[in-house]
């Protein structure tokens, strides 16, 4: 694994992007490609749902915040609901400080993100 590992797949009919490592200006391009791939995958599923699992992120800088905001906007434009999963303080704290936790759909676990029955944003 490099500084950032991003995996994109469909699991039980839902597009998932799993992120592990440090998200900063030097690694954000890897995340952006994964988010774009995830939105494309989600757009082709009946659920039209992308879950972004950030629970294994060890650093989440402003580049990461901008990336998930952009993914949320792209998802909305394509009628795809983007849901973030994070319980780790490395991600939760920056989301809280910037108040993005009030704008983005955030969850403490993948199962709670899946269970939410809201449609696309």
Image (spheres, rainbow, N blue to C red):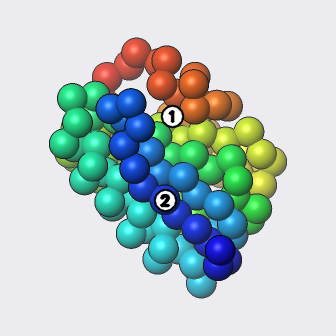
Sequence-wise, which precedes: disc 1 or disc 2? 2
The quadrant in which residue 23 appears is bottom right
Question: Can you tell which of label 1 and label 2 is closer to the viewer?
Answer: 2
- Above or below, 105 against 6 in this view is above
Q: For this rendering, which residue is in front, 67 or 37?
A: 37
- Residue 2 is left or right of residue 104, and the answer is right
User: Residue at the location (64% across, 31% down)?
Assistant: 109
Q: Is residue 42 above or below residue 58?
A: above
Which residue is found at the position 36% from the left and 43% from the top? 10
Judged left or right of residue 50, residue 87 is: right
How many residues crowd around disc 1 within 10 Å: few (fewer than 14), some, or many (20 or more)? some
Where residue 91 appears, as percent x and y from the top left, is 71, 52
Q: Is residue 90 visible?
A: yes
Front one among 38 and 95: 38
| Residue 7's disc number | 2
> As drawn, is 46 to the left or to the right of 116?
left
Q: Which mark is residue 105?
A: 1
Q: Secondary structure at mark 1?
A: strand
- x and y percentages locating residue 40 in the rendered image: 25, 53
Q: Residue furthest right?
A: 89
Q: Residue furthest bottom?
A: 26
In the depicted view, which residue is nearer to us: 52 or 73? 52
Depicted 76 relative to depicted 114: above or below: below
Q: Residue at x 28, y 28 (%)?
A: 47
- Distance between the alpha carbons at the discs numbered 1 and 2: 20 Å
């Amino acid at each position: 694994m490099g500084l950032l590992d991003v995996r994109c797949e469909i699991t039980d009919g839902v597009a998932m992007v799993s992120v592990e490592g440090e998200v900063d200006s030097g690694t954000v391009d890897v995340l952006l490609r994964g988010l774009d791939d995830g939105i494309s995958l989600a757009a082709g599923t009946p659920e039209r749902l992308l879950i972004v699992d950030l629970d294994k992120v060890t650093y989440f800088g402003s580049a990461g915040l901008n990336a998930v905001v952009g993914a949320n906007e792209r998802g909305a434009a394509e009628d795809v609901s983007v849901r973030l999963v994070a319980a780790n303080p490395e991600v939760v704290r920056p989301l809280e400080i910037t108040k993005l936790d009030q704008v983005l759909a955030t969850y403490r676990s993948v199962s709670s993100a899946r269970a939410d029955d809201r449609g696309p944003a």
